[in-house]
Image (tube, rainbow, N blue to C red):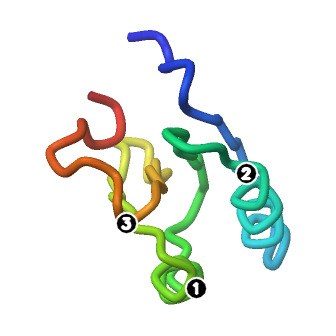
Amino acid sequence: MPKPINEILLDARGLEPPEPMEKVMQTLALLRVGQSIRLLLHREPFPLYPLLAERGYRHVTRMEADGSYVILIQPATAAAGEDPPGQ
């Protein structure tokens, strides 16, 4: 399924900490109303989750068959019931 236009794809697989978190924070600053971030990582970004919550964002995380992660990040006020990563 093609990536929605209102979604920014951020492929941080292979980047070492703190680069993925820095890239997410930079991208959050660029988000417009209605946009979200689809983050691809090779490990689960546990330190990122509380930072997102503090800034008013929610996330849905899914582990892929290859052990990588897809994290959908959107404002906490985004409509509930939106498709999780990969749907």
Using the image, determine if residue 40 lies above or below residue 42.
Answer: above
Residue at image coords 50%, 19%: 3
Q: Quadrant of residue 75?
A: bottom left
**Camera sees residue 73:** yes
Residue at image coords 64%, 36%: 8
Mark seen at residue 51: 1
Residue 27 relative to residue 86: left or right: right
Q: Position of residue 66 (x, y in %)?
A: 43, 43
Q: Amino acid at mark 3?
A: Ala
Residue at the far top in the pictured view: 2
Residue at image mark 2: 12
Using the image, determine if residue 56 lies above or below residue 6.
Answer: below
Using the image, determine if residue 35 lies above or below residue 51.
Answer: above
Residue 34 relative to residue 80: left or right: right
Residue at the far front in the pictured view: 33
Q: CA distance from mark 3 to mark 1?
A: 13 Å
Q: Amino acid at mark 2?
A: Ala
Q: CA distance from mark 1 to mark 2?
A: 17 Å
Q: Nearer the viewer, residue 76 or 12?
A: 76
Residue at image coords 82%, 70%: 22
Q: Amino acid at mark 1?
A: Leu
From the viewer's perspective, is the residue at label 3 or at label 1 nearer? 3
Residue at image mark 3: 76
- Residue contact between numbered discs 3 and 1, judged by CB atoms under 8 Å: no
